[in-house]
C-alpha cells in the first residue's frame, strides 16, 4: 500500500490518548513510506494524524469542502489540499486516492465514511483493506455489534473478518498488508454464483 485514507474525529474535547494514537498513526504511515489521505482538518484527531505524518516529512493530502476550507478548520501545512464541491465528492475523491482505509475514533462522520467503505468492499466496488484502531476500546461495542450481525445472518463471516482491528497502528498496518479480498463471499452475497 502506498496510500491510506484515515477517517477520524475533529473534536478537541476528547481524551489525550486518542490524539496520541492519531499522531502515532501519522508517524507510522510516514515511517512506512505511506501517503496519508484524510479530511484536511487541523483540529482533534484529524490534526494529530496529519501532524504525526508531517513531523517525519510524510506526504499528506487533505480533501475538504468549501465550508470546511477555513482558517479555523483547515490544516495550512499539508503537502496538498483538494477542495471538492460537496461531501459526496469529497468521500469519492478520498476513496480514489487511497489503497486502504483506517478508522480512528470519531463520531457520525467517521462512522459514515467507515461503513460506506465497508459496504463498497462488500459489493465489489473496491478490494482495499479496512482497519479500525481500537484505542481505549473505543470500537469494541461496534465490533461486538458486527459479530452479532454475523450471528443473526445479516453479515457474512468473511466480510466481518475483512474488517481488521488492533490497538496500535503498527500492528494494524501489518494485518492490513496481509489482506486478501473475499472474492467468494462477494460473489455469494451479490448472487453471482
Image (tube, rainbow, N blue to C red):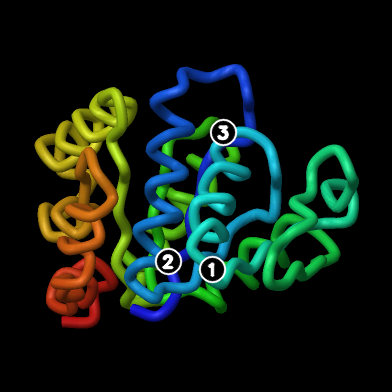
Residue identifier under label 1? 57
Label 1 to label 2: alpha-carbon separation: 7 Å
Name which residue lies at 42% across and 34% down.
Answer: 20
Is residue 94 in sight in this rendering? yes
Residue 176 on image: x %, y %: 22, 65
Name which residue lies at 29% across and 23% down.
Answer: 136
**Dot 1 and dot 2 residues touching (CB under 8 Å):** yes
Residue 113 on image: x %, y %: 52, 51
Q: Nearer the viewer, residue 140 or 15?
A: 15
Residue identifier under label 2? 30
Name which residue lies at 38% across and 46% down.
Answer: 24
Label 1 to label 3: alpha-carbon separation: 30 Å
Taking the view exactly as shown, the residue that stands out farthest to the front is 56
Label 3 to label 2: alpha-carbon separation: 27 Å
Residue identifier under label 3? 108
Q: Quadrant of residue 147?
A: top left
Q: Nearer the viewer, mark 1 or mark 2?
A: 1
Which quarter shows the C terminus?
bottom left
Amino acid at each position: 500500500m502506498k496510500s491510506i485514507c484515515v477517517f477520524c474525529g475533529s473534536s478537541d474535547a476528547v481524551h489525550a490518548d486518542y490524539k496520541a494514537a492519531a499522531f502515532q498513526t501519522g508517524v507510522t504511515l510516514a515511517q512506512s513510506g505511506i501517503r496519508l489521505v484524510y479530511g484536511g482538518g487541523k483540529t482533534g484527531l484529524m490534526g494529530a494524524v496529519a501532524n504525526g505524518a508531517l513531523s517525519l516529512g510524510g506526504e499528506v493530502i487533505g480533501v475538504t469542502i468549501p465550508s470546511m476550507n477555513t482558517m479555523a478548520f483547515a490544516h495550512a501545512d499539508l503537502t496538498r489540499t483538494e477542495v471538492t464541491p460537496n461531501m459526496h465528492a469529497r468521500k469519492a475523491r478520498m476513496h480514489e486516492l487511497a489503497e486502504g482505509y483506517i478508522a480512528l475514533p470519531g463520531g457520525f462522520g467517521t462512522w459514515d465514511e467507515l461503513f460506506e467503505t465497508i459496504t463498497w468492499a462488500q459489493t465489489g466496488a473496491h478490494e482495499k483493506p479496512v482497519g479500525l484502531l481500537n484505542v481505549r476500546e473505543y470500537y469494541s461495542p461496534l465490533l461486538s455489534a458486527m459479530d452479532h450481525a454475523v450471528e443473526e445472518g445479516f453479515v457474512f463471516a468473511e466480510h466481518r473478518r475483512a474488517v481488521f482491528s488492533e490497538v496500535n497502528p503498527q500492528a494494524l498496518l501489518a494485518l492490513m498488508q496481509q489482506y486478501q479480498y473475499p472474492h467468494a463471499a462477494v460473489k455469494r452475497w451479490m448472487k453471482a454464483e
